[in-house]
Image: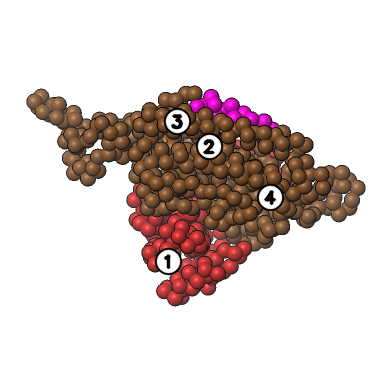
Chain colours: A red, B brown
Amino acid sequence: MPALEFANQLRAKFRELVSAPAEFRGEVTLTLADAGRIAEVCEFAKKSLGFDYLLDISSVDNYGDDPRWTVVYELYGIAHGCHLRLKTNLSEEKGELPTVTSVWRTADWHEREIFDMMGICFRGHPDLRRILMWEGYPYFPLRKDFPLAGKPSEMPDVAFTKKAPLEGGPFVTLPGGKDTITREPRVRVPEN
Amino acid sequence: MATETIEFREPSARVNLASFAAQPAAPAAPSPPAEDLQELHGEKLVLNMGPSHPSTHGVLRIVLEMDGEIITKATPDVGYLHRGDEKIAENMTYTQFIPYTDRLDYLAPLANNVAYALAVEKLMGIERQLPPRCQHIRVICCELARISAHLLGLGAYAMDVGALTVFMLTFTEREKIYNLCESLTGARFTTSYTRIGGLMRDTPPGWCDAVRKFCDEVAVNFDEVEKLLTRNPIFVGRTKDVGIISRADAIDFGLSGPNLRGSGVEHDVRKAHPYLVYDQLEFDVPVGSVGDCYDRYLVRMEEMRQSVRLLRQCLDRIPGGADNKSGEPVNVDDGKLVLPPKQKVMTGMEELIHQFILVTQGVNAPPGEVYFGAENPKGELGFYINSRGGGTPHRLKIRAPSFVNLSILPHLLPGHMVSDVVSILGSIDFVMGECDR
């Protein structure tokens, strides 16, 4: 499997920084031990292994676990048609990793989105602003501790809600509920 | 002055960006009257385009910084349609999220349904078990959606650059696609047609023949549209050599779909990583040679013809024939994945249990993570699903092609004129429902 060969080349170059490749549903995932070196690994993957196309960057909130954040890079090579996933974890205290905008320019908006939604910072990003939410919004809505119903925010002239958009509303599900009884949409009394 | 070096006879006049950088910023203080005109020349004008502008096809806002009529800096502002789809997905079962996928690229809801269902099925590891009839119907859905999205894209594009008739022509055909959607799914717009492991239902009687009739009619329509646009001097003048995206830039900015292929990159997910029955079907992938707006138009035009070709092949090959006389299944034969037939729920114990578990807890996905990208009309629609087991995703990330395609605007727009912005936006063919999620 060619993706596995690329994974092994990355391991040969970076040794213990890169974990053993994990395979699931025909996809190869590598985990980087040090988030601070992600740009270096991506640079090598692009220049030497032909991963010239960055499909996507995602972020995962492992709320309750340490390290809290996982950043996931989906790499693809147009010429060889191989897909490779790079993952790296970083702790909540750190919350920062180097940008890969210098490797692929498409990373610009993906990183801005992660900053906007999760609050993870990208060191060296040329223009790290919120992208989907408005400038000055105080929360990071994709974090697991942000309720689905929303949080009240006060931003005169831009967006002003005394109540959260769905607070106590009839169609609010609770996050993380294991069964439908706890998750089902129903009127809920706001806590406290 | 930089403006003096511009050749205005070319509509696509591009200026040397370095000369803008070297130019000192206009002083704010009033200058002596003798120099007034000179100073005014260099002053930058900030123009706000959108979020409610006919050519932005939705709620895209672009802040344009201009020197005369030439754009020196463009800052797109997205997010006006943000609904938090990814957050919502984390709080419901996989099946419950299907209606939300209708609202991503709302010009091609059927294609989104198929892409999402395939992503979850990849996570479950059942994409190879899908019955052939289901796969063929899904391909028909995808290609109908592609034609529908491209027809709207072309019609609106032509209208933006001044050809109103095309819009009327293409919308006549889109109306027929909506009618087909209605008889297939019960809804014209928000189709929610796929299910994890199958489809909501089989095709209704006579539907396949209706699609075949549509194929014949739409092919005539393509010819009419082509006659109106392809050699139309106004359309060609507005699009040719405007908004050139080089091959390297297209890859670097992660463009996908017709925008990537317009720049000459022969990459189509249907060819590179065939899903469904695309590997058994014959179709060509059109690519552009220059990478300008005109090339992207030509690629879309040809893609629609290829879609008709795919539709005809699927209709010929569909197992069970048009009306499924032989009773081919459309769902995976697994009670733990697909809802049992309603009449059995109240009579069979096992069916009742399956129904109850599936409705209350959803399909039981294994822990793991997958990325699945499908070739949608706008480009590669990808779903990254991070599962910790159970019926709800821990994290579902949507790679929206429109979002990625729009990220090239700050690089592409500078050096063009304001009128070219309309032309370039139309050729990128984005949809904000998907971009903002």
Q: Which mark is first along the chain, 3 or 4?
A: 4
Dots 4, 3 in contact, CB < 8 A: no
Question: Of the residues shown, which amino acid type is indicated by label 4?
Answer: Gln
In the rendered image, which residue does mark 1 sit on? Answer: A49
SS at mark 3 in the image? helix
Q: Nearer the viewer, residue B75 or A128?
A: B75
Residue for point 47% across, 28% down:
B228
Which mark, by number, is residue B229?
3
In the rendered image, which residue does mark 2 sit on? Answer: B150
Question: Of the residues shown, which amino acid type is indicated by label 3?
Answer: Leu
Check residue B152 for magenta coloring. Answer: no
- Locate residue B243, reporting x and y percent: 36, 40
- Locate residue B115, reporting x and y percent: 61, 48
- Locate residue B319, reporting x and y percent: 74, 49
Q: Nearer the viewer, residue B132 or A20?
A: B132
Neighbours of disc 4 within 10 Å: few (<14), some (14-19), many (20+)? many
Q: Is residue A52 above or below residue B154?
A: below
Residue segment shown in magenta: B166-182
Q: Nearer the viewer, mark 1 or mark 3?
A: 3
Report in which chain the residue with disc 3 lies: B
Residue for point 58% across, 67% down:
A23
Alpha carbon of mark 3 to alpha carbon of mark 2: how far?
A: 14 Å
Q: Quadrant of residue A44?
A: bottom left
Q: Nearer the viewer, residue A167 or B120?
A: B120
Q: Is residue B18 left or right of residue B210?
A: left
SS at mark 2 in the image? helix
Report in which chain the residue with disc 2 lies: B
Dots 3, 2 in contact, CB < 8 A: no
Q: Is residue B68 left or right of residue B406?
A: left
Neighbours of disc 1 within 10 Å: few (<14), some (14-19), many (20+)? some
